[in-house]
Image: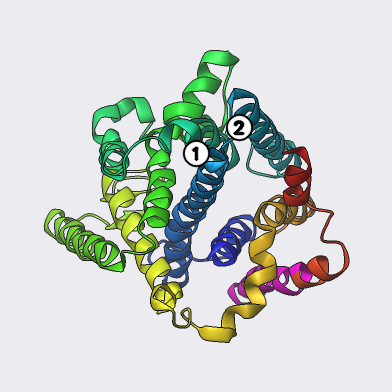
Amino acid sequence: MRAIAVLCMVEVHTAAIIPPEGISVGHPAAFVAAAFGGMAAPMFVAISGWGIHMSAIRRAADPAHNAGIWLRWLAPRILLLSLCQLLVNLLLSADRGGRFEWQTPGVLTLLAIGALLAPVLIRLSMRSRALLMLVMMATPLALGDISGPDWSWWERVGSEGVSEWLARLLWNGTYPAVPWLGFVLLGSLIYDLADNPAARERGIVLGLAATTVTAAIAAFEEIPWALTEGEAVLTFFPASTAFLVVSGTFVLIAHRALEGSEASGGEPGGGDRLASLESAGRITLTIYVAHFAVLGAVASAMQGEPRLELVPAFAATIANTLIWIPLAAWHQKHIPNISFEALLNRLS
């Protein structure tokens, strides 16, 4: 699931950099791209939260663990994730035709916050974390105008001074801690419920019921069901409560589908057909950062150039998404020790 999450992120970002000419919001291709976009980031954050939670639990289980050991676990993760976020921003800088300012907080700084909170979160009961997750998903209702519902993209990724940067990091950036930490908590719950598929399936049923309600509201109010931003029931920038609930539901569905009967000793979903993704799953952070180097070069080269037609744009998007599968396999065979993951292991 790690590999699928990062590949979905690659697809979404590629589609954003090379959007096809003449595609409106109502076009089927736009709907498919939006569906991937709505699923990719929640899945990526939830699976990363799963990994952070698992690693923190293992560290806490060490009889010798103390404040010093926790610091040696935390410091490399927070530093590396923050530096990788800075690198991503520079690779896709607005000055080179990209989408970010150099100081823009993003998904990696969100994960750094998740790592920082992990020693506290693992001490909470599963019920307490579930309640906290629901609170996070409800926070957009309380944030209101503070989250910047009418902001342009450049207002959301820009900041002047420390106070604005902290606001983008915490509640009105692209992936602010509030409410996106809800997905980190969801990942921790998925980990804890590994041996209780019935509980996860109850969550899926409740989520699908809520999803049906959001679709009914959209039909009754005669407004779009989902848009990246604007007036809709589900919005990504800023993340609405309805979006958080619906995308969280689809994260659970995706996890359940990929798990198959593995929890009961059987085969995972897809069996051996997904074995080719194992290498990519081991270096998701490396792929995430590296694909921005490619997109940064493309964005710089395309400044002032006309958009591609639908078929070439679609082909380029799919090619840039799938190429990371054989590249990851080659990497793991020949240079497995050269990656951000390997660096993190050495630093820890």
In the rendered image, residue 44, in percent from the top left (x then y), is placed at: 52, 54
Q: Earlier in the sequence, mark 2 or mark 1?
A: 2
Question: Residue at coordinates 51% horizontally, 49% vertically from top-left?
Answer: 54
The residues colored magenta run: 310-328
Residue type for callout 1:
Thr
Q: Is residue 88 above or below residue 312?
A: above
In the rendered image, residue 49, in percent from the top left (x then y), is placed at: 49, 47
Asked if one can make out residue 173 in the rendered structure from this viewpoint, the answer is: no
- The quarter of the rendered structure image containing the C terminus is top right
Q: Residues within 10 Å of mark 1 (few under 14, many from 20)?
A: many
Residue nearest the observer in this picture, 256 or 241: 256
Residue nearest the observer in this picture, 255 or 323: 255
Residue type for callout 2:
Thr
Q: Is residue 312 magenta?
A: yes
Tell me the element at label 1.
loop
Q: Which mark is residue 36?
A: none
Q: In which quadrant of the rendered view does residue 154 lie? A: top right
Residue 11 left/right relative to 178:
right
Residue 277 left/right relative to 49:
right
Q: Which residue is mark 2?
A: 104
Q: Is residue 316 above or below residue 273?
A: above
Q: Which residue is mark 1?
A: 174
Asked if one can make out residue 197 in the rendered structure from this viewpoint, the answer is: yes
Question: Residue at coordinates 32% horizontally, 51% vertically from top-left?
Answer: 243
Q: Is residue 177 above or below residue 231?
A: above
| Dot 2 and dot 1 residues touching (CB under 8 Å) | yes
